[in-house]
Image (tube, rainbow, N blue to C red):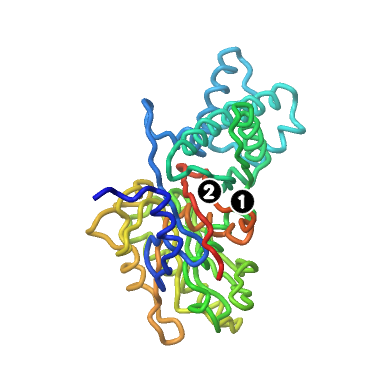
Amino acid sequence: MESQSLESQSLTLEKSPPPVLGHGGRVLPAVTVDTYNEELRDGEGFVGDRASGRACRAILEDWRARLRAQGDDPFGDMPTGEISKARMDKLLVAGDPLTAGLIHTVVEEFAQELATVVRRFLRLEAWSGTERIVVGGGLSASHIGELAMGRAAVLLAGEGIAIELRSIGNHPDKAGLIGAVQLAPSWVLAGHDAILAADIGGTNLRVGVVELNMKKGDLSKAAVWKYLHWRHRDDAPTRDEALARIAAMIEELMEEAAAQKLKLASFVGVGCPGLIDEHGTIVNGGQNLPGNWEGEGFNLAAELTERLPRIHDHEPVVILHNDAVVQGLSEVPAMADVTHWGVLTIGTGLGNARFTNRARE
């Protein structure tokens, strides 16, 4: 028996009703997730690593070393890791010619790497026909990130590749929380004011309360009411310590929401790196998380559920999906004018997902 073509598989998913709630779902209320967490390789390793936040820092350090060899590094003794994106943004327009030139050079080289990565993704069958790519992650919120995206789009257009690159609409700190509202059918959320969400990355962790602001099933006005942030990489916690901290942050927000009389749904949407199976297990891709989070011996959804208090006398339902998928889902309201679109998240690594909008009844 011949295997289904990608097109027929996509049509099958399009017509399939979404499950009420499920981990790592491919059929969601608003979109089908055609693919995510693609780990493309070339002779140097993972292709996505060429357009990660670490890659951008490496480019900056490389050019600083070249300037130091000539006796003139405009950043002096400051470690590259301490040079913030905000400072680079400022120096790009207000710095001396050498410093501005250095940052321009970094932007240009990173844009070339980003264009290479986009080109490779668009060659994948599951990414065929992609009309727009939104770029998330911390770099996307900076001026240098926006310039790199613009330059990458120009490079691709010069090769005859028509693809729109745009920054994610919500702030990257909030997009990975807002997208969680798209993991559940709107009728599951009806009658509630907000949900709890967590965005677990390789460096940072955020937990928030997302107000639904829902009218007739429309979640386009969902917004973060309040969130807590923890840069866990600085503290190097064990896995159990990280889980305890996540639960404590969620409980703190639950208390604040109760004080404001916000009615929380008994639902917690969680985005985390890697490939997520239907049981809530991280199959692979969680190597940047503190401790070992991968494999059948650890179930993140079950572990969090066990640590969380009841919500309005109900046990919370914790639903997991890939963090790039969840961040991309925050853009669902802005993607009505296209059919096939994707997301790339520039963080510790490069997250990725491709979506097809589901037909509205």
Q: Quick one: label 1, few (<14), some, or many (20+) residues within 10 Å?
A: many
Instruction: Tell which of 113 and 55 is nearer to you.
Output: 113
Percent position (x, y) of residue 345?
52, 46
Instruction: Tell which of 228 and 43 is nearer to you.
Output: 43
Residue ID at (56%, 63%)? 178
Query: Which residue has dot 1 on it?
Result: 168
Above or below, 37 against 22 in this view is above
Tag 2 secondary structure: strand
Percent position (x, y) of residue 20?
41, 73
The number of numbered discs placed on residues in the rendered structure image is 2
* Label whose residue precedes the other's in the sequence (1 or 2): 1
62 relative to 148 in the view: left or right: left
Residue 79 visible in image: no
Viewer-nearest of discs 1 and 2: 2
Residue ID at (47%, 34%)? 120
Q: Quick one: label 2, few (<14), some, or many (20+) residues within 10 Å?
A: many
The reply to whether callout 1 and callout 2 are in contact (CB within 8 Å) is yes
Quarter of the image containing the C terminus? bottom right
Instruction: Tell which of 105 and 189 is nearer to you.
Output: 189
Residue 323 visible in image: yes
Q: Quadrant of residue 72?
A: top right
Amino acid carrying mark 1 in the image: Ile
Tag 1 secondary structure: loop
- Disc number placed over residue 235 in the picture, else none: none
Query: Which residue has dot 2 on it?
Result: 343
Spatial separation of the CA atoms under disc 1 and disc 2: 9 Å
